[in-house]
Image (cartoon, rainbow, N blue to C red):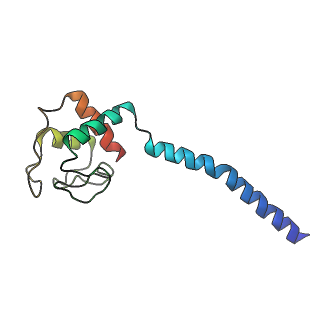
Amino acid sequence: MQRRSLKIIKWLFILAVAAVLPSATISWAQGKTALSPAAKGGQKVFEQNCALCHFADQANAKIGPGLKGVLKNKELPYSHKPATVANAREQVEKGNPQGKPMAMPPFGNKLSKTQLDNLLDYLKTL
């Protein structure tokens, strides 16, 4: 009798996991791939202005540092300032003379405020 109860519990557990897992996986996948309209705009800005020197999908250096997780890290690459949106904005606007192998040029006069806001929204998703 006890053995049969264990089998029933085991099958109920398997059914419960099978029922929950697909919806949890779909929610996770949607959260990973769905960008807000602002972040999509920022992705376009990134591709047009940043992708030449930076990877978006890895932390390895290209010419400049890879930016995967850049705003989730403790500090920004090379400048070592805290990884905040304000510091990232300043670095994009003013550039970074400490960049290696070459300085990062400023983009403050090249990007509009909306483009910069969208770019930062995109960087938050990396």
Q: Position of residue 18 (x, y in %)?
A: 68, 54
Q: Where is residue 80 in the image (x, y as percent from the top left)?
A: 19, 54
Q: Position of residue 6 (x, y in %)?
A: 82, 67
Residue at position x 26%, y 49% in the image: 83
The quadrant holding residue 113 is top left
Front in this rendered view, residue 8 or 43: 43
Q: Position of residue 63 (x, y in %)?
A: 16, 55
Residue 86 in view (yes/no) = no
Residue 50 in view (yes/no) = yes
Seen in the image, is 98 located left or right of residue 27?
A: left
The answer to whether 15 is drawn above or below residue 50 in the figure is: below
The quadrant holding residue 36 is top left
Residue at position x 19%, y 40% in the image: 49
Front in this rendered view, residue 47 or 2: 47
Seen in the image, is 42 located left or right of residue 94?
A: right
Residue at position x 25%, y 41% in the image: 46
